Amino acid sequence: MKTKRIYEFEPYRFQETCEVLYCEPKDEHWVVILDRTIFYPTGGGQPHDLGELGSAHVLDVYEEEGVVYHISDAPFSAGDLVQATVDRQRRIDHMQQHSGQHILSAAFEELLAAHTCGFHLGEEMVTIDLAISQLTAEDAQRVEQLANEIVMENREIDISYIPRQQLPDDLVEKANTTDESLRIVRIAGVDRVSPCCGTHPFHTGEVGLIKIVKWESYKGMIRLYFLCGKRALQYIQQLSAEVDETVRFLKTDWTHLRERVEQLHSDWQENKRQVRRLYETSIRMESEQLALEPTEQWGRLSLYILQWLERPFQEVKDLAKTLMEQPDRIVLLVSGEATQQVIAGRSNNVQLSMKDLLAQIFQHIEGKGGGSANFAQGTGRGEAVEFWLPQVKRWMQEQLEG
């Protein structure tokens, strides 16, 4: 026997006395079937209601073949009369978000001929997927304006069951049901009608503010994020508080905020360029100083072998590349002790593969990395540098002499 679903036409009924028809244990909870229910089951992109059955908590609600199942944290007996109580705030929030989606989808359809292909009502954000490949800020603002005009006009939202043979084929297909009659949602003055099983208020004014938050490309469509009602108000309040705090911090007012941020960004870019120039000068000066005293001299070949216990790897890399600019040099630089970050580089006229050199080092420290004949880098753990370096140097000499 199908469950009588009171929520379909009485969405503001938050309490109802119901009779328990069935109760059986399932996964440490109980599955309860009632003769009637005010609890909305998950479906159509809308999450289920929460609340209580007597003193028991309703943890989940789902529907199968017209029967609504309630997951309870306490058992009942068939024939028990229990008072069902729906979480009022959650129900109203879901009504606002879902009806706001209908209004927003209708606005997109009217202004941009953009059909809604998907809907999801999440805990924090609501999304629709639109059958368009791009969306401009100007068009989004126009749609948002129209949607909020529909809200402020407080139009009637009508719910009715219509025989499927009286409806267009595309609506019947969208409903994805074999029922003889389909539940249809109509907003006064909007041509678009929708088959829908969700909960809705009686007038658009009850939806409150509709606010588009952002959008992104998704599978050739546009996924749009938005909020309605209390969620939209909280979002605007938080945004306003952030702007106020930023304005105070930057010692300006909100009308000049963009100008102030652009100036700060320009200053930051210039400072960044200056810091980069100073950094490059510092690296070059250090390189020139190191070049005066090679670690070892093998004939005309100068070796530069250095280790720092702590030094940013990018600095080590930049220093190695600067040292390599002059001919007849091999550079082997290490940053770290327990974990060793290794750079191996050579001048263009040196006939020794740095990739092969790194592979030799990895025979002593378990590591990974790679590179080319001119330049290689990697990271590993194992023997200290003073233990693996003599063997690696012998291999280098053999390669150069051969």
Image (tube, rainbow, N blue to C red):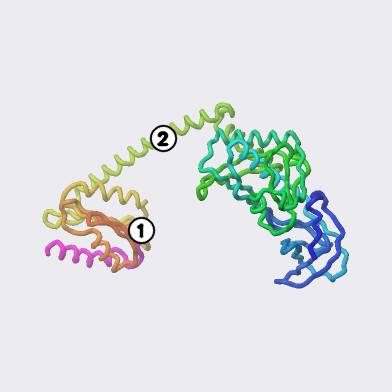
Q: Is residue 364 visible?
A: yes
Instruction: Considering the whole magenta stretch, tell me its main secondary structure.
Output: helix
For residue 269, which numbered disc appears in the image? 2
Residue at 74% over, 33% down:
153
Region rendered in magenta: 379-402
Q: Quadrant of residue 298?
A: bottom left
Question: In the rendered structure, which amino acid carries the disc numbered 1?
Answer: Gly
Query: To which residue does mark 1 refer?
Result: 336
For residue 176, which numbered disc appears in the image? none
Report crowding for label 1: few under 14, some 14 to 19, many 20 or more residues within 10 A (C-alpha): many
Above or below 285: residue 177: below
Which badge, 2 or 1, is on the more N-terminal residue?
2
Residue at 21% over, 48% down:
291
Above or below 209: residue 360: below
In depth, the one of 296 and 133 nearer the eye is 133
Q: Position of residue 357 (x, y in %)?
A: 24, 62
Q: Is residue 340 left or right of residue 165?
A: left
Find numbered disc 1 in the image and state the secondary structure of the residue it sits on: loop
Q: Is residue 215 magenta?
A: no
- Farthest front residue? 165
Residue at 67% over, 39% down:
210
In depth, the one of 358 and 381 nearer the eye is 358
Above or below 154: residue 288: below
